[in-house]
Image: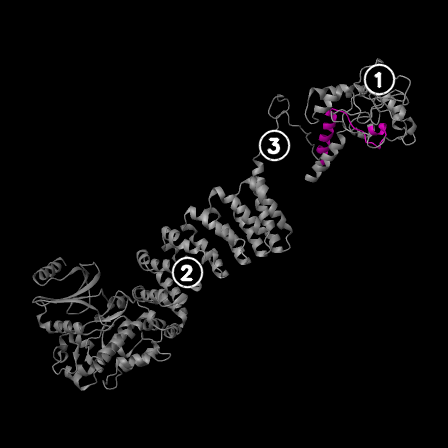
Amino acid sequence: MDFLKSAVASAISKGPAFPYSFDDRVEIDKSIWTLHNSTKREDGSKCSVFSFDIAANKSRLPLARNSLRKLRTLRHPGVIKVLDTVETETVIYIATERLVPLSWHIKRKSLSQETVKWGLCGIAKTIKFINGDATSIHGSVRASYVFTSESGEWKLAGFDILSSIKDDDAIIYNYGSLVPDSARYAPPEVTKTGWEAIKRNPISAFDAYSFGIFVYEVFNGGFVGTDQLSQPKGVPPTMQQSYKRLINANPKSRISAGQFLEQGQRSGGFFETPLIHLTEGIDNLGLKSDGEREEFLRRSQQYSQLDAVSDDFPEDFFKMKVLPELLKSVEFGGGGPKVLGVVFKIGAKLSDEEYEHKITPVVIRLFSNQDRALRVCLLDNLPVMIDRLSQKTVTNSIFPQMVGFVTGFSDAAPLVREQTVKSVLTIISKLSDRAINGELLRHLAKTSNDEQPGIRTNTTICLGKIARNLGAASRTKVLTAAFARSLRDPFVHARNAGLLALAATVDLFSEDDCASKILPGICTSLIDKEKLVRDQANKTLDIYLQRVRKHALSLPDTILPPAGAPANSASASVPRMETTQAGASWAGWAISSFTNKLATASGQMDVPANVESSNASSDLRSNSVPPVITSAPQSTAPVVARGLQPQVNANKMQSANPFAPSDALQADDDDFDTGWADTGGGWDDEASAADPFAAPSVLEPRTTDKATFDDQGEPDFAGWIAAQSKQKSKNLLPKGLVKKAANGDRPGLGVKANSTGNPVTKRTEAKPKVVPKVVTKSKVNEDEEDDAAWGEAW
């Protein structure tokens, strides 16, 4: 190998400049040429170079020169493309497009039947052109002289003895036998009578027989001798009849390659395949009229069959030949979504570098197209191409087109808006955090209130699936608001989607949010009118309850300080409720706490205006406090009237907090205990059985001192009682007697005051002033109202 390369390099240096670099050698079957993979020095493009060493094959020099001359003058899509030629005294070079011997694929049997038919159709067209338009005979149609180009197309070479029938001294007559292995491929008439027999038979007879052998080779993996030709086991049944007519022993009865082609292209013929239709219509597709393009799509069966069998097609052909033409048609020729679908299917087989170079620029330009059908097709195919697009391309080029004012989320067509929402799941991994938490969320907020219920539902599903891509700072707020709105949606599937999304994102919410924000919304769905929603609400509720209950197990039993804690502790001022016993109802501890408040309350209690004083005293006390029984006569003892309080307790009543411990409260408790002790420590049965409408009971006075004292304008209680003796039949206090003065004191209940400020009474006999026991201000009514409000809150 090194010797060959050095010899070639030496020959090039001695001859004219040849701007191609020789790489490795390509093994080909019996041929007078040596094939090398090469590159063009100018641009590094790939190519192949056929070389002929004149010194080593001087007897076959006429064949090499004939091939050089014919390749320079003969141009056809089925013939190898010549780039450059050089002939010196020692070597002949023919630079062509990059080629691969077809025999490699045949030996490996790597060709599908679809591909073989497509290749045979192309070679048949080339032979038809040579026999017909060029009025020539090729003379060497065989697998070793057929190559595949970079596009996968089959190309015919081996023009060593290609001759025109118009030339009486054609090279095929004199040098045909110099072609390697010519005897094995020669037709029967040449084998019997020599190469001069070609002149006596139709021009197409020689190449037709050679083409028949070629058909057998490609379907069976090779050819050994003419005895095998009569058993076409690998040839498709639909082709066998035409194949037998190609290898007919009688040259005048053989069909030509052109006739073979016509039979295959008939309706239902063996050349009626999607790949062949695509090849015939792909050239200049963008230049075709609308009618021609529709006919092409129809013949390709709207690409449906093409998509079904395209895996069997040659990939190189799609990459190099079909794809460029399809891209031109879509972008400039109005190919539309039908053609674009095939583009993405072909693009899936490209390498990342090829995709970036060929597909990505076109996709970016197409996203700015105003054709809605094209936009929907692009969005549908985003999953196919998203892995090939860089994050920069998606964020800077594609996403701005998706959120445009005319297209995408704001498009007037609901289908486009819906597909745009669905496509978010595909591109979310390629978007920057700023784009996600900024513009994307703003547009999703609009689609979550879209007039189309399906779009609202899909937006909720989308938010649930991209929840983990949202920023931690705004995620909880966004999801809570979005899912809460979906639970109130009139569309049943939107509500169900909200519950499903909540169940899928339970780990994204804190326990406090689960308990205070999420669970209340789920509870309303438990009584939804649709069973679908109710069932899902129960499932979602269980998920969140398990989360909250698990968190509750980690919380302490209480945050209150233990018994005996210092009074100046932080929680010393917190009112402590009694601990409920096992089996106690929820109301038990609440009532117990309520009575504790009454027992420690300070101030003076108000008596209802329409209730007797004695009854008021009895009714207003707590059930847990025994009644106060006095030994004083009912007719002479003073009664504590509503709104009347001694001056000594006025300030205390103004400032005392009934729910906060203080020295004043302790003093009142002492008085309360003293009064309770004076009664003998028990209930008075006679007093208990007394007529409830009798004269009111009196409290035991705190002092027996009959000396008067300055009451500072307070009314005479005893005098007021005497004035009311005339109303014993009713025994009710007049209405509207309590009226708070501006200075905070309470003037006498309907008692007139003289110029000195002292009350004037009708009693003429002086009665001793009685300092009544300080009774807590009527907080009972207030506590009852608080208790009622607390029950409602519960």
Q: Quadrant of the N terminus?
A: bottom left
Residue under numbered circle 1? 769
Read off the magenta span: 587-616
Callout 3 amino acid:
Asp
- Disc 1 to disc 3: CB gap under 8 Å: no
Find residue 357 and report its image quarter: bottom left
Which secondary structure type mostly characterizes the magenta part of the structure?
helix
- Depth-wise, is mark 3 or mark 2 nearer the camera? 2
Position of residue 106 measured from the top left corner of the image (x, y, whole percent): 27, 68
Horizontally, residue 402 falls left or right of residue 656, namely left
Residue under numbered circle 3? 557
- Residue at image location 72% in from the left, 31% down from the top: 594
Callout 1 amino acid:
Lys
> Mark 1: few, some, or many residues within 10 Å (few <14, many ≥20)?
some
> Mark 2: few, some, or many residues within 10 Å (few <14, many ≥20)?
many
Position of residue 75 measured from the top left corner of the image (x, y, whole percent): 21, 73
- Disc 3 to disc 2: CB gap under 8 Å: no
Residue under numbered circle 2? 378
Instruction: State how far apart marks 1 and 3 are (Cα).
Output: 55 Å
Find residue 785 and report its image quarter: top right
Horizontally, residue 645 falls left or right of residue 389, namely right
Callout 2 amino acid:
Leu
Find residue 326 and report its image quarter: bottom left
- Residue at image location 68% in from the left, 29% down from the top: 577
Instruction: State how far apart marks 3 and 2 are (Cα).
Output: 59 Å
> Mark 3: few, some, or many residues within 10 Å (few <14, many ≥20)?
few
Horizontally, residue 763 falls left or right of residue 510, namely right
Number of labelled discs? 3
Does 654 sit above or below residue 406?
above
Circle 2 SS class: helix
**The residue positioned farthest toward the front in the image shown:** 755
- Depth-wise, is mark 1 or mark 3 nearer the camera? 1
